[in-house]
Amino acid sequence: MADEKTLTVTRLVRKMRNLLEIELGEVWVEGEVSNLRRQASGHIYFTLKDENAQMSCVMFRGNAVKSKVQPDNGMQVKLFAEVSVYEARGSVQLIVRSVENAGEGELQAKFEALKRKLDAEGLFDQDKKKPLPSFPMRVGLITSGTGAALQDMLHVLERRAPWVQPILYPVQVQGKGAEMGIAKAIDEWSEWKENGLPQVDVLIVGRGGGSLEDLWNFNEEVVARAIAACSLPVVSAVGHEIDFTIADFVADMRAPTPSAAAEIVVPDGDELRDRLRNLSTLMNRRVESEIRHFDTTIASMRRGALSRSVDRLLLEPMQRVAQLGKDLELAVEDQVSEQELRIREVRLRHANVHPERVIERREEYLQSKKSALENVLQSTLQRMSDKLQRKADLLRTLGPESAFARGFSVTTDKDGKIIKSISKMKEGDVIVTRLGDGTKESVVKE
């Protein structure tokens, strides 16, 4: 019979849990995430491992929603967790409170150190910031050619200012050495003429969101100095609104997202049209107001002491008022006409580069090439046919049929071998004589 010191499995497991929670409690643990599973409830289950051991982990929904860093398979992370025991299985597990990328603390320290260094050199000074152009016609995009950030910027530019031409300089925006490609693109566009690049009015440098490690290439000193030395205005558009990089502090303008950068650098076409209409209305009202003011003044003078000689005294002022009214009306018409002309020019320029127009020109070019190729082929085939016909006529002239027609014949043995000498025949041999109208077999006799 078991003594009083014998424990049930449940009591043993609970003692183990109490010991672990009391002795270890909450700890920081570093390792690699694997076997991650996200439940519909929002809880996250995964394994944390290193080269020698592994441990089960659970991150409940409340902590998972608040965590800035979301664990994923293959990530190297640091966990703040409570050591406990899952009673149903008797297994040790970590109840995760928060997740950080491994080494993020070191990266943050590097970030702050470089920020202080560049700030002391004056790279962040506001008086060094270049103003953005009011009406850019070409916008340079330095980002990944396959990322979602590029598509977001293109969509915004097309919607707000379809006359603006975006030009991409594709670069790697993440991973070892990516900062060198980013800095090179900025440097080359800064000296666009010497490097054979198209001229642009402003640059947008950036990428979509990610962890501190994902965005780190934009915290490298080589990128910061390239932005500071660039001859063109640079807008930094790295990550999400809550993300800040060294590039943001050096750039002439920081945008919270790539989409926001596209909105910042170009005006809204609809807003421009509204402003033009409002300006035209305002100027017309000013002209009408001035005319009414002069009309009132004239009427007052006519009612005054000078009314007897009003025609003589007011002739010149009335002419001046009339001329001023005409001048103002012409100025308004000229301004409106100029703005309408600019809008038409922009629309025509946009129409010429519209994909449908480009495709039409390409189709016309291909059709002309196709017709030319067909003509060359037809001419070549005709020459080859004529040449072949001449060869056939010559062959018939020089061939055996021509000799047969002139009365000649050919004699062969029964195997078809031509007999060139009578010495090659002996009595009893079967020979075949071919004439122009057929063949005849014969037997040789002495």
Image (cartoon, grey):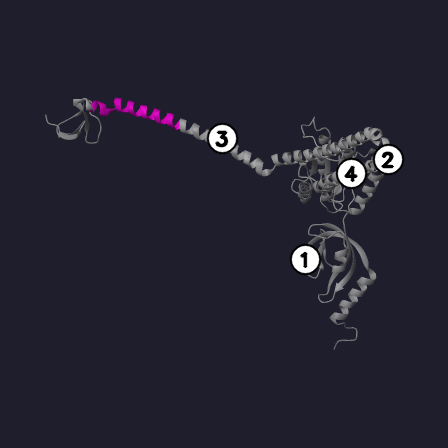
Q: Is residue 179 visible?
A: no
Which callout, 1 or 2, points at the residue further toward the start of the chain? 1
Which callout, 1 or 4, points at the residue further toward the start of the chain? 1
Which residue does the numbered mark 1 point to in the structure image?
Answer: 37
User: In which quadrant will I find the C terminus?
Assistant: top left
**Is residue 401 located in the magenta-colored stretch of the structure?**
yes
Q: Tell me residue 234's x, y (percent).
A: 76, 36
Q: Nearer the viewer, residue 114 or 255?
A: 255
Other residues around mark 3 within 10 Å, as few (<14) / some (14–19) / many (≥20): few
**Left-right relation of 411 to 294:** left
The amino acid type found where label 1 is placed reads Arg
User: Marks 1 and 3, Cα distance to the nearest angstrom?
Assistant: 59 Å
Which residue does the numbered mark 2 point to in the structure image?
Answer: 301
Would you say the residues marked 4 and 3 are in contact, meaning their CB atoms lie under 8 Å apart?
no
Any mark on residue 369, and which? 3
Specify the principal SS of the magenta part.
helix
Instruction: Identify the residue at the far front of this view.
Output: 308
Q: Nearer the viewer, residue 51 or 419?
A: 419
Q: Tell me residue 270's x, y (percent).
A: 70, 42
Instruction: Identify the residue at the far bottom of this view.
Output: 1
Q: Tell me residue 346's x, y (percent).
A: 66, 35
Q: Which residues are magenta?
A: 380-404
User: Marks 2 and 3, Cα distance to the nearest angstrom?
Assistant: 80 Å
- Considering the numbered disc 1 on the image, is that residue within a helix, a strand or a loop? strand
Which callout, 2 or 3, points at the residue further toward the start of the chain? 2
Q: Nearer the viewer, mark 1 or mark 3?
A: 3
Q: Is residue 421 visible?
A: yes
- Considering the numbered disc 2 on the image, is that residue within a helix, a strand or a loop? helix
Which residue does the numbered mark 4 point to in the structure image?
Answer: 288
User: Marks 1 and 2, Cα distance to the nearest angstrom?
Assistant: 91 Å
Which callout, 4 or 3, points at the residue further toward the start of the chain? 4
The amino acid type found where label 2 is placed reads Met
